[in-house]
């Protein structure tokens, strides 16, 4: 599999975005199921592309296989949201995408100090991807992630320091400090 990316262009991609978001459930996201109206409204309101947000399609061998969105891209600590189409999961695309986005954000902003990622405690695959890509668990939020039916899950915060990304090392968190 060859990973490439393409910026999300809402003037051409709003319908593709709506198709992508509505054709499957997203079990580890706050909104697990999207309607077409919700997806198109999110495209129009700047949730995917705006002054502090941008998104890219993840292309596996040229096919739309995923989507990554970056929030707070100009504050030195961007946060990302990664969605892999279920037909492309468990093929290494998540790891390739997180490595790509780490490099992309580092190249885009020379002042970048860190990248953040949050996931639900039960998203073992994403937690493993983050660890494999140099992210370190930095926080644990008890009963803080809303799921379907009002169920609350623990949330886990991860961070990747720019210096660690550049050097290929991992600096542990000093929990006892």
Image: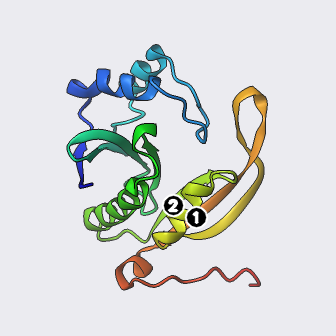
Rendered location of residue 4, percent (x, y): 23, 52
Rendered location of residue 138, percent (x, y): 64, 69
Rendered location of residue 87, percent (x, y): 41, 38
Image quadrant holding the N terminus, namely: bottom left
Q: Which residue is mark 2?
A: 116
How many neighbours does mark 1 have within 10 angstroms: few (below 14), some (14-19), or many (20 or more)?
A: many
Tell me: residue 177, above or below residue 29: below
- Judged from this view, the residue extending furthest toward the top is 37
Q: Secondary structure at mark 1?
A: strand
Circle on res. 90? none
Residue 124 picture quarter: bottom right
The tag earlier along the polypeptide, 1 or 2, is 2
Whether residue 109 is visible here, answered yes or no, is yes
The residue sitting at 46% across, 38% down in the picture is 86
Label 1 with label 2: CB-CB less than 8 Å: yes
How many neighbours does mark 2 have within 10 angstroms: few (below 14), some (14-19), or many (20 or more)?
A: many
Whether residue 51 is visible here, answered yes or no, is no
Q: Which residue is mark 1?
A: 158
Q: Secondary structure at mark 2?
A: strand
């Amino acid at each position: 599999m060859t990973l490439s990316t393409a910026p999300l262009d809402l003037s051409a991609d709003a319908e593709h975005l709506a198709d992508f978001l509505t054709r499957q459930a997203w079990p580890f996201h706050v909104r697990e199921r999207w309607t077409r109206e919700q997806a198109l409204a999110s495209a129009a309101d700047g949730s995917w592309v705006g002054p502090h947000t941008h998104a890219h399609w993840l292309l596996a061998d040229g096919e739309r296989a995923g989507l990554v969105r970056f929030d707070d891209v100009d504050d030195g600590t961007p946060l990302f949201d990664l969605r892999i189409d279920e037909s492309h999961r468990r093929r290494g695309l998540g790891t390739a995408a997180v490595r790509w986005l780490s490099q992309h954000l580092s190249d885009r902003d020379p002042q970048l100090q860190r990248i953040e990622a949050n996931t639900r405690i039960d998203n073992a695959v994403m937690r493993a991807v983050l660890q494999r890509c140099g992210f370190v668990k930095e926080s644990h939020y008890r009963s803080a992630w809303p799921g379907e039916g009002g169920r609350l899950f623990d949330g886990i915060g991860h961070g990747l320091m720019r210096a660690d990304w550049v050097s290929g090392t991992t600096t542990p968190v000093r929990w006892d400090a």
